[in-house]
Image: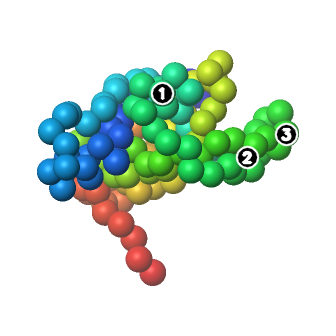
Amino acid sequence: MGKVIVRIKLTNYSDLVVRRLKLAKRKPRTVEVEALVDTGATRLYLKPSVIKRLGLVRTDTVRSQTTNGDALRYKYEPVQLELMGRRESFDVIETPENVPNLLGQVPLEVLDLVVDAKGQRLTPNPAHGGEQMTEEY
């Protein structure tokens, strides 16, 4: 199986809220970056350079299991992530600069996207007829 790399659009969520409330007229800080789809990762992980460009504020520290053992990582305020016409807000976990931006399982589940390993791409969940859906049981 090869790598699945996607282009994602990220917007500082706090900037969106401030603009919606008409407290500021400037455009929200937005970037488009490549991210490695990693179903072994849990969350949205971004490089420090991307976090800086978005102007995100650190909110917490989280313990993370990595291939090199446990590590402490910084957690940042949310971004709005847009991919394949779908969007949702997610907290950000900082990853080292030498590690790719990672799109983990939680964002994939919420956006209702699945990995087509053979085609090396993301697809809308076929179980939901291509439309984004949440599941409640």
Q: Nearer the viewer, residue 81 or 53?
A: 53
Q: Secondary structure under badge 2?
A: strand
Q: In the rendered structure, which amino acid carries the disc numbered 3?
A: Gly
Numbered mark located on residue 52 in the image: 1
Q: Which amino acid does the dot numbered 1 rest on?
A: Lys
Name the quarter where the C terminus is drawn: bottom left
The residue positioned 68% from the left and 49% from the top of the image is: 61
Residue labelled with disc 2: 64
**Residue 124 location (% of width, % of height):** 33, 47
Question: Looking at the picture, how far across and down is residue 63, in whole percent?
Answer: 74, 50
Locate residue 83 relative to residue 38 in the image: left or right.
left
Task: Tell us which disc is closer to us: 1 or 2.
Answer: 1
Mark 1 vs mark 2, CA separation in Å: 21 Å
Residue wearing tag 3 = 69
Q: Nearer the viewer, mark 1 or mark 3?
A: 1
Looking at the image, is 132 positioned above or below residue 27? Answer: below
Between discs 1 and 3, the one toward the N terminus: 1
- Looking at the rendered image, the quarter that the N terminus falls into is top right
Relative side of 75 to 116, left or right: right
